[in-house]
Amino acid sequence: ARPKLGMATSRRFSAVAILVCALVSPGTSLLVPSARSGGSPATPSSPARQCVRVSAPAAPLRLRPLVLCAAEDRPLPSISSPEVALVVGSVLLTILVANRLFTNQEEMLNSQSRADLIATAGATVLLLEALTRLDITPREADSVPLDGASVDWLDPSLPAAQRRELDWAADALTSCLPARSLAIVRDGRTLGLRGTLSARVASDEAAYSQAVASGPLLDKCLKKCRDRSGTPDYLPSLQILPGRFEFTYLPTATQAVLLVPLPGVTGGAIIMGADQARAFKEDDVAWARTVASGLGAWMSG
C-alpha cells in the first residue's frame, strides 16, 4: 500500500503543478457563479467567455458547480505579474525536482513520467514567458567629476554668419544632450570648443585652432562625411577602450564619446564627451544627427 500511496502523491504533485501553470497564465481566473433564484446554476454574463465544466456530480440543484472560465475582462493582476510568475515557476520546478528525487524510480509508471514532463515543461514556459514580460532596465552609471577647465571659444577668423551657426549648433547640443565637452572640426582645423576640456588644451588659447588631434577613431568618423546618412560612432564606455588615449583634448575621466560626422563637409565632425558611461541614449544620438545634418548642409552650401 505504501508504494501505491507514494505514486499517488507523486501524481498529485504533477497535477497541481500543471494546474498552477495554467492558472498563472494572464487572463485566467477561477469563477464560481452564483445560483439563480430558480435553483439552476447561473451562466456567464459575457458571451465572449468560454466556460468548461470541471466536475458534474450528481448533486441537488442548490449546489453551485465549479466552473473554469477564461475571463479576459477579469484578469488576476497579482498572478499575471512577471515577478509573481517567476517565483511560482521557480517553486514549481523545485517541487518537481524534489518529487522526482524522492520517488522510487523502479515503481514509477509511464503515466507519472509523462505527467512530470508536462509539469516541467509548463513551469519552464511560465518562467520564460515571465522573463519576456519582465522589464529589465540597466542601472545608470554614476557621474564622475571631470578634471580640466571650461572653454567657450569659436574661431575668430570665421565670418560672422558662420560663427552664429556654430554657436547655435553648440548651444543646441550642450543644452539638450548630456555633453560636457564639445569640439567642432573641419579639415584638421578646430572651429569651436565648448564645455570642459583638458587643462593642457584650455591653458593655451593660441593653440585652440589645433586642439583636436586626429586619430584612428576620428579618422574613421571623418570618412563618413561623404555619406549623407551621417552615421555616428558611439563609444559608450570610453575608459575600457585602448583608443581613449586619442582624445587628449578631452578630460582624462571622460566616460563616453559621441563622434558625429558633418554630412557633405569634407573632414567635418562634432566630438562630444560625457561624464557618465552610456550617457547618450537613442534619442540623444538622433538629435545630434539632426543638428549635424543642418550644420553640414549650411556649411557645404
Image (cartoon, grey):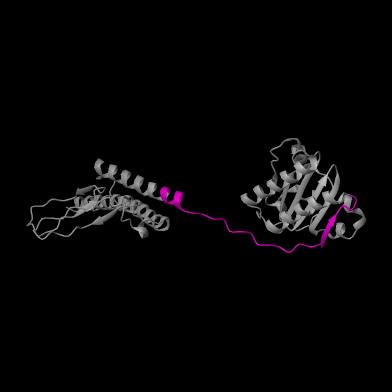
- Whether 231 is drawn above or below 146: the answer is above
Residue farthest to the right, as pictured: 206
Residue 230 % position (x, y): 71, 40
Which quarter of the rendered picture does the C terminus lie within?
top right
Q: Position of residue 140 (x, y in %)?
A: 61, 59
Whether the magenta-drawn stretch holds residue 138 is answered as yes
Q: Determine whether, in the image, residue 35 is placed left or right of residue 113.
A: left
Decide whether the magenta segment is chiefly helix, strand or loop. Answer: loop
Q: Is residue 95 left or right of residue 47?
A: right
**Total count of labels:** 0
Name which residue lies at 58% across and 58% down.
Answer: 139
Quarter of the rendering containing residue 296: top right
Q: Is residue 217 left or right of residue 30?
A: right
| Residue lying furthest front | 161
| Residue sitting at x 77%, y 43% | 298
Per the rendered image, the range of residues in magenta is 128-157
Q: Nearer the viewer, residue 42 or 242?
A: 42
